[in-house]
Amino acid sequence: MRLAQKVALVTSSGPGPCRETAKLFARQGARVVVCGRNAEQGRMTVEQIRQAGGQANFFLTDISLAADVKATVDETIATYGRLDILFNHAGHTHAQDSSVVELSEAVWDRVIEVNLKGTFLCCQYALPFLRQSGSGLVINLVVSEPGQDKRSQSAIAISRGGVLAMTREIANEFAQRNVRANLIWLSPAGADAEFMPGLEQPRSLLARQVMYLPEALAASPNRFEQAAQAALYLANERSETTGAVVIVGRSNGGG
């Protein structure tokens, strides 16, 4: 098993890439902590893992609250004694998200509070323990849903860019401290890389490296399962990849 003896904290627990990642990590031997605001979905994820013979716990957490995040990380350490992998997905959207000119302060605040601040808090409280593990890993996930980019959604778009920049900063800051940080960009099925112009240009300011999920790992037609495979790919202990963006969901499955 590729993740035997590892402990992974997965934020968000509902159906989708986080549940698939939690289940795959558990199948590969990791002990998994799932956290989120939806207790029913979180317990369902844990039950599915346990029924398959894995180890998992759920903690009710609002990642936009520092006290909640700290308590969840502390509970993880109290339960399992270590933390090796942080898998972050803060993908809050708002029906009233709109153009920069029309966007209300309340909508801006809520989207940024969850997506950017929430990701920051999870990283902030997890990083000291990831350093202690000797081979810590932060994986931040950004999801672009079908049709989401066809209308102005400034808050979600800016929050994605912030998470990307945060990933790069953590990769730089912790490069010599036994922690890697990478980002998975889950694009709509059949999409190419045009959602982020310039990202593939040499010496990008936002990412050290841009890659596509290897075709051998993209066999599933389910893009959520592909995202989980990308997370497992990045969790390879022998990998030195850090500061990278892995694009998942491309029409040709990567390459």
Image (cartoon, rainbow, N blue to C red):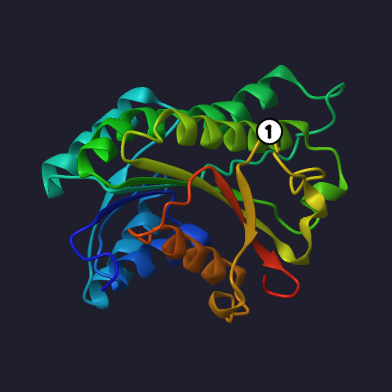
Does 194 appear above or below 220? above
Identity of the residue drawn at 70% across and 31% down: 158
Does 251 appear above or below 150? below
Q: Position of residue 190 (x, y in %)?
A: 77, 69
Identity of the residue drawn at 82% across and 53% down: 194
Towards the viewer: 251 or 178: 178
| Extreme residue toward the top, this view | 105
Quadrant of the rendering where the N terminus is positioned: bottom left
Q: Quadrant of residue 111?
A: top right
Helix or strand or loop: what does disc 1 sit on? loop
Q: Is residue 176 left or right of residue 144?
A: left
Does 203 appear above or below 49? above
Q: Is residue 118 visible?
A: no
Q: Quadrant of residue 218?
A: bottom right
Towards the viewer: 163 or 2: 2
Identity of the residue drawn at 24% across and 68% down: 29
Identity of the residue drawn at 72% across and 62% down: 188
Quadrant of the rendering where the C terminus is positioned: bottom right
Q: Is residue 127 left or right of residue 218?
A: left
Amino acid carrying mark 1 in the image? Leu
Q: Position of residue 222 (x, y in %)?
A: 60, 75
Does 137 appear above or below 169? below
Q: Is residue 87 visible?
A: yes
Q: Which residue is mark 1?
A: 205
Q: Position of residue 80 (x, y in %)?
A: 14, 49
Q: Is residue 149 left or right of residue 210?
A: right
